Amino acid sequence: IDRKEPQKRTITALGLGKIRKSVIHNDTPQIRGMIRSVSHLVAVEEID
């Protein structure tokens, strides 16, 4: 990923890294903050 180091670490911490990879996380304030910091790089969808 050609991004700043903090963004790379956040993407890795979220379990992402490859194009089109999907992961499921619980909705916590920590996860929301991580998503917010890389929102321009990821797509987020809420599931039931």
Image (spheres, rainbow, N blue to C red):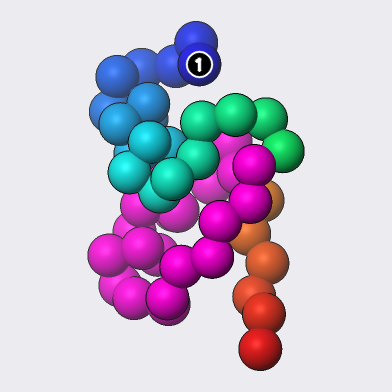
User: Which residue ends up furthest to the top in the rendered image?
Assistant: 2
| Vertical arrangement, residue 24 with respect to residue 27, above or below | above
- In the current view of this chain or complex, which residue is farthest to the bottom? 48
Between residues 14 and 35, which one lies in front from this camera angle?
14
Amino acid under label 1? Ile
- Which residue: 36% across, 52% down? 34
Q: Position of residue 24 (x, y in %)?
A: 54, 65
Residue at (37%, 30%) from the top-left corner?
Answer: 7
Residue for point 30% across, 31% down? 9
Left or right placement of residue 47 versus residue 16 in this view: right
Q: Mark 1 Cα within 10 Å, few/some/many (few <14, many 20+)? A: few
Vertical relation: 35 (above or below) 1? below
Place of residue 36 in the rendered image (x, y in percent of width and height, measured from the top left): 44, 53
Residue 28 belongs to magenta span: yes
- Residue 36 on the magenta span: yes
Q: Residue at x 63, y 51 (%)?
A: 22
Residue 11 image offset from top left, x and y in percent: 42, 37
Q: Is residue 28 left or right of residue 39?
A: left
Q: Secondary structure at mark 1?
A: loop
Q: Tell me which corner region of the image, top left, top right, bottom left or bottom right, holds residue 5.
A: top left
Considering depth in this image, is 34 or 48 the residue closer to the camera?
Answer: 48
Look at the image and tell me in which quarter the C terminus lies: bottom right
Choose between 7 and 13: the one closer to the eye.
13
Q: Which residues are magenta?
A: 21-42
Q: How many marks?
A: 1
Residue at mark 1: 1
Q: Find residue 41 and report its image quarter.
A: top right
From this view, report whether residue 18 is shown above or below residue 42: above
